[in-house]
Amino acid sequence: MWLIIVVYAGLVFTLTALSYVLMFRPKCKSLEFTKQASLGREEFDETILNLDWQEWSFASPHGYTLRGQYLRGRKDAPAALFVHGITWSRYGMVKYMRPFIERGWNVAAFDLAGHGASMAPRRFYPSYGFYEKYDVKAGVESLHSLFSNAPLYGLFGESLGAASALQYAPLTKAKPSREVDFIVADCSFSSAWEELLEQYRAIHMPNFIAWPSAHVTRLFVRLLRGFDIKEASPSKAVLLTDIPILFAHGMEDSYVPTIMSVRMASARLSNNIGLTELVLIPGARHAVGILTDQMRWLSAVDAFIDRVFLEKSEKCNKASCNISLNEESK
């Protein structure tokens, strides 16, 4: 009997340790590595890197400095902030920025805490959006300083970046005007807790081992990182904001299940909360929807942004203000 208990406890402890290390202490890739890897995958070429990019930094409310780059487009064009996924860097977002750069948009991207060139205390990353959402907020505010006259402000995120963007959205709910006009969330998870359980399901871990391990991992994160993984929850956040959101997801995503985006979009639609769109990309794995079928991805995003702008224009007309979107920006 004691042997069974010891073996069982050992299995739970081992799974807990692996879960904590892999999910909450992953090794982040260097800025140069992510640049070369993205070039090697042909997500973009050197031509786009040779444009007039400017170095950019801003302060996190947690006390460290976040670093990135921005590129000025036309003065009358929209501005957008792009937020990358876990262990990667700003270079992971160039594939999303490229079509908007070609249209003359003003774009910016930064490295999340502990990623790329943004050094930060270990306790802050990754937190699956719990801490990152405040850095996204600081980034959006800095975006406004860079491009103060943009007719439209957008926020694009991939995976962890998407989840952070979605959790940022309710932080602006009390403001008279939105800091961003729309969010495009590509392959976001619905919560850190659900993502942890999904990783167990993916390796067919029996529930009698997975459940206690998940709860012990949650306790470790509370003690060592200062937050509850159940509170790192985009699915809760999207119900607390009416900011227009487009959810995008690859239908062959085995890392973050497609159903997570489907459920978040469905929850907003069923509760009639804000403009909500969903685009699913057949054949696309995690974080490659725009590369798998750019026409489908971009067509959905373009139609969504058109609706956002129309909605903003109608509200602006009622308030007797004036905004316009140059045809070249579309």
Image (cartoon, rainbow, N blue to C red):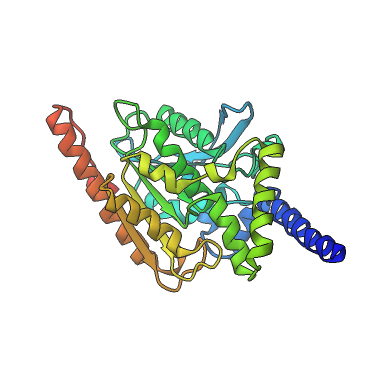
Residue nearer the viewer, 323 or 164: 164
**Which residue lies most toward the bottom here?**
283
The residue at the point 65 percent across, 35 percent down is 226
* Residue 239 spot, x, y in % from top left: 36, 44
* Residue 251 spot, x, y in % from top left: 44, 69
Residue nearer the viewer, 221 or 40: 221
**Which residue lies most toward the right here?**
3
In this picture, is 112 found above or below 94? above
Labels in figure, total: 0
Which quarter of the rendering shows the N terminus? bottom right
The residue at the point 74 percent across, 58 percent down is 12
- Please tell me in which quadrant of the rendered image residue 221 appears: top right
In this picture, is 170 found above or below 3? above
The residue at the point 64 percent across, 58 percent down is 211
Asked whether, in this view, residue 127 is left or right of residue 3, the answer is left
* Residue 311 spot, x, y in % from top left: 20, 42
* Residue 269 spot, x, y in % from top left: 28, 53
Asked whether, in this view, residue 47 is left or right of residue 153, the answer is right
Residue nearer the viewer, 221 or 148: 221
Asked whether, in this view, residue 20 is left or right of residue 68, the answer is right
The residue at the point 18 percent across, 30 percent down is 322
Whether residue 305 is visible: yes
Residue nearer the viewer, 163 or 7: 7
Whether residue 30 is visible: no
